[in-house]
Amino acid sequence: MLQRECSEFLTDVLWSIYAERWSSLPSDLVGTLDKRFVSVAQRAAFYA
Amino acid sequence: MTSALDAQLAELLKRCSENCAGRGSKVVSMSEDAARLELLWLQYLTTSQLTGTANCLLEGTRSAIREGVSCVALGLVRPALNSLRLQIDLVLGWLYFKDHAVEWGRVQCTGDGFKMKTELLKYISDSYDRFGARFGILRECKILTACCQRTSTVKASTCFRKFKCHPTSWHQQSRKTRP
């Protein structure tokens, strides 16, 4: 569904900008992002 | 002439009503769920990241979501696609103009200085530390997930491209402009 693609694209842009502020972001956003990582190393690289 | 126009309008109304009555609520629920993460981000940005400049672009993004959902419920596909495109334009625009009050003022006063997506994405990439690396990781996640699930015949990278700088299927310069 294209709305989901659109939402995911914007979410990815915003995450890539505001990743350092993860502790103040809604837990639902953080939880959803964490489920997308396929490895611990990938998650660590993202938040590094 | 008028009777022909009336007949066409009556047909349009009938088709829209049928779409709404037949699958409207299902489509609206699905669309609302699809926009859930975007709405959460908009809520966060409007409560803690506003600068006082170009705030209306985020409110406009919410409106574009509502508009897109409404159009889909009515069966109006092309306006719905334009609403999706608008969501991207508005959020990327906000990321630039929120910190550029002078440029924002110029756009409001003269209409000049509007930024294209390529410019905005370059600005974001140049201005936010580690943007490119993080964005690349998320794209990699998307591709790997799509490969694992094998639920779509469309490659993840192809889906993603629709929302990058030149979404060929939407910019009205392809055969897909035919309804």
Image: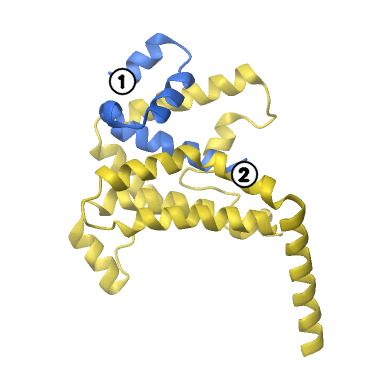
Chain colours: A blue, B yellow
Label ID, residue A22 = none
Q: In this view, does B176 lie above or below B160?
A: below
Q: Is residue A45 above or below residue A14?
A: above
Q: Residues within 10 Å of mark 2 (few under 14, many from 20)?
A: few
- Let me know if marks 2 and 1 both belong to one chain: no
Q: Which amino acid does label 1 sit on?
A: Tyr
- Separation of residues labelled 2 and 1 (CA atoms): 33 Å
Q: Name the residue under label 1.
A: A47
The chain letter under disc 1 is: A
Q: Nearer the viewer, mark 2 or mark 1?
A: 2
Q: Is residue B90 above or below residue A41?
A: below
Q: Residues within 10 Å of mark 1 (few under 14, many from 20)?
A: few
Rendered image quadrant of residue B130: top left
* Residue B162, x across and y down, in percent: 55, 43
> Viewer-proximal residue, B17 or B127?
B17
> Viewer-proximal residue, A9 or B133?
A9
Residue at the spot 22% in from the left edge and 61% down from the top edge: B103
Asked whether the viewer can see residue B106, the reply is: yes
Q: Mark 2 points at which residue?
A: B29
* Residue A41, x across and y down, in percent: 38, 10
Residue at the spot 39% in from the left edge and 48% down from the top edge: B118
Q: Is residue A37 left or right of residue B79?
A: left
Q: Outermost residue toward the bottom?
A: B1
